[in-house]
Amino acid sequence: MIDKDLLIKTVEEALEGTDKYLVAVTVSPADLINVEIDSDSNVDIDTCARITRQIESVFDRDAEDYELEVGSAGLTSPLKVFRQYRKNIGNDMEVLTRDGRKLRGVLAEAVEADGGDIAFELEVQTKEKEPGAKRPMLVSRRVPLKASECKYVRYDLKF
């Protein structure tokens, strides 16, 4: 069985001194390892290969018999760590809350909240009709949310 804590430590050591950071590590009961990293700039194939070699130098494939995948957090992947929220301030995001509301807007602010949660504000555009007005007007407002209240927060891709 793969020691997940040692695996996390190994990846974090490999990322030390770079602008890359660990997003998630999953280890299945069948020893399928998935390491997801992100960066303030970009993640290239050489970084993924270097991390793979680092992991393989610590965990012997013959002894552990594992399958390893190291990759970057994709555009459609939900945000998972605070650093991803901070990096995406000003970007269009899609949020699905646990109570079923789907919101689209610009990530306006993000802070680390108590207990490791992430508090953020999404600036959304809504149509509101002023009393006495003939047509509704677009009004911008900020919606305060917490990551723990959301099923996902991800890029709102528009083509």
Image (cartoon, helix red, strand yellow):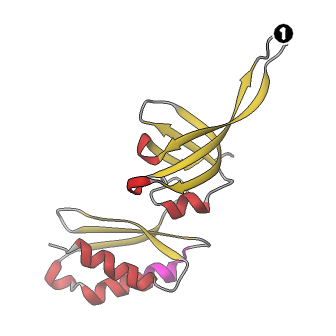
Where residue 105 sits, quadrant-wise, is: top right
Q: Relative to 75, does residue 101 appear above or below in the rendering?
A: above
From this view, report whether residue 60 is shown above or below residue 1: below
Q: Position of residue 122 (x, y in %)?
A: 62, 43
Name the quarter where the N terminus is drawn: bottom left
Image position of 142 (left or right of 113): right
Question: Percent position (x, y) of residue 70?
Answer: 40, 72
- Disc 1 element: loop
Q: Residue 66 vs residue 122: left or right?
A: left
Residue 110 at x, y percent in the picture: 57, 54
Where residue 115 sits, quadrant-wise, is: bottom left
Q: Relative to 15, does residue 75 appear above or below in the rendering? A: above
Q: Main secondary structure of the magenta part?
A: helix
Q: Identify the residue at horizontal 37%, vertical 79% (top origin).
A: 11
Magenta residues, start to end: 43-49
Decide which of 125, 59 is in the foreground and name it.
Answer: 125
Residue 159: x, y in percent?
69, 46
Query: Which residue is located at x 55 percent, y 78 percent?
Result: 19
Q: Residue at x 79, y 19 (%)?
A: 136
**Residue 94 located left or right of residue 132:** left
Q: Is residue 47 magenta?
A: yes
Query: Which residue has dot 1 on it?
Result: 132
Q: Is residue 144 magenta?
A: no
Question: What type is the residue that disc 1 sits on?
Answer: Gly
